[in-house]
Image (cartoon, coloured by chain):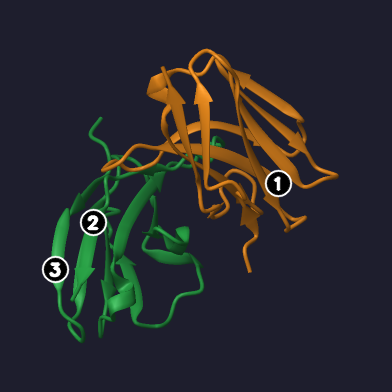
Chain colours: A green, B orange
């Protein structure tokens, strides 16, 4: 089985721009979660989607949004980028068994200049 | 407000000795706990989990201990190997194995040969 795939792996944007990141979960996984990783804050939960519906949401401003498609692929969007949005954005998927294990992608490294 | 705390940013251990990584939590609703390991330039990978109905779970060299009254869990690695050098994240969920995971900031473990 292919793992969680995130694109692009690296990108550079300037303040005020917007960015869209993409995530393809493991085949058969219907839940996709997004996390932001920064050196000082560790992994912070952004949101989780399940069957095209947002199931959980973290404490991020409305500039951060996401969606999930019928094939479980997910995108997250950040509008009006700020310098502090520079981070590694990680996508994770899981199935509906009871292990709770999240399978992470390698992340998209966003740098905002 | 950090609900999951890993108070040691780093830990250095000699190869063959025991590594003990600690994690404290504040939310008494957490009922499922996991440890993830992360190498540079890779996404986190699942290591071991424990439900709140247990106080210990073991998998090979890795054992997780849960002390609910103290709201504390720890990960023991015995014996430690140089390949264990990575950042270890503690995570907790209030919705069982399918709740969204709240992560700590991580502890960087260095195992010296």
Q: Looking at the figure, which quarter contains the N terminus of chain A?
A: top left
Q: Are marks 3 and 1 on the same chain?
A: no
Apparent side of residue B52 relative to residue B42 in the rendered image (left or right):
right
- The residue drawn where x is 50% and y is 47% is B106
Query: From this viewpoint, is residue A92 visible?
Result: yes
Query: From this viewpoint, is residue B60 visible?
Result: no
Q: Are marks 1 and 2 on the same chain?
A: no
Residue at image mark 2: A108
Q: Is residue B44 above or below residue A67?
A: above
A35 or B112, which lies in front?
Answer: B112
A67 or A81, which lies in front?
Answer: A81
Give the spatial CA distance, label 2 vs label 3.
11 Å
Residue B53: % across, % down:
77, 35
Q: Can you tell which quarter of the image residue A52 is in?
A: bottom left
Give the spatial CA distance, label 3 vs label 1.
39 Å
Residue at image mark 1: B31
Residue A56: % across, % down:
51, 65
């Amino acid at each position: 089985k292919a793992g969680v795939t995130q694109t692009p792996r690296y990108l550079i944007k300037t303040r005020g721009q917007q960015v869209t990141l993409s995530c393809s979960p493991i085949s058969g996984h219907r839940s996709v979660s997004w996390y932001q990783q920064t050196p000082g804050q560790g992994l912070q939960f952004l949101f989780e989607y399940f069957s095209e519906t947002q199931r959980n949401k973290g404490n991020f401003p409305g500039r951060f949004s996401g969606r999930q498609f019928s094939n479980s692929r997910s995108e997250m969007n950040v509008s009006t980028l700020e310098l502090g949005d520079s981070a590694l954005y990680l996508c994770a998927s899981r199935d509906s068994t009871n292990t709770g294990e999240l399978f992470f992608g390698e992340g998209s490294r966003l740098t905002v200049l | 407000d950090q609900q999951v705390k890993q108070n040691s940013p780093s830990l250095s251990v000699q190869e063959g000795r025991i590594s003990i990584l600690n994690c404290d939590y504040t939310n008494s609703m957490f009922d499922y706990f996991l440890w993830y390991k992360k190498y540079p330039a890779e996404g986190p990978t699942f290591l071991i989990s424990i439900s709140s109905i247990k106080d210990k779970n073991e998998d090979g060299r890795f054992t997780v201990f849960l002390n609910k009254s103290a709201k504390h869990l720890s990960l023991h690695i015995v014996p430690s190997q140089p390949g264990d050098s990575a950042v270890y994240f503690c995570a907790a969920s209030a919705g069982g194995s399918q709740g969204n995971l709240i992560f700590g900031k991580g502890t960087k473990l260095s195992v010296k040969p």
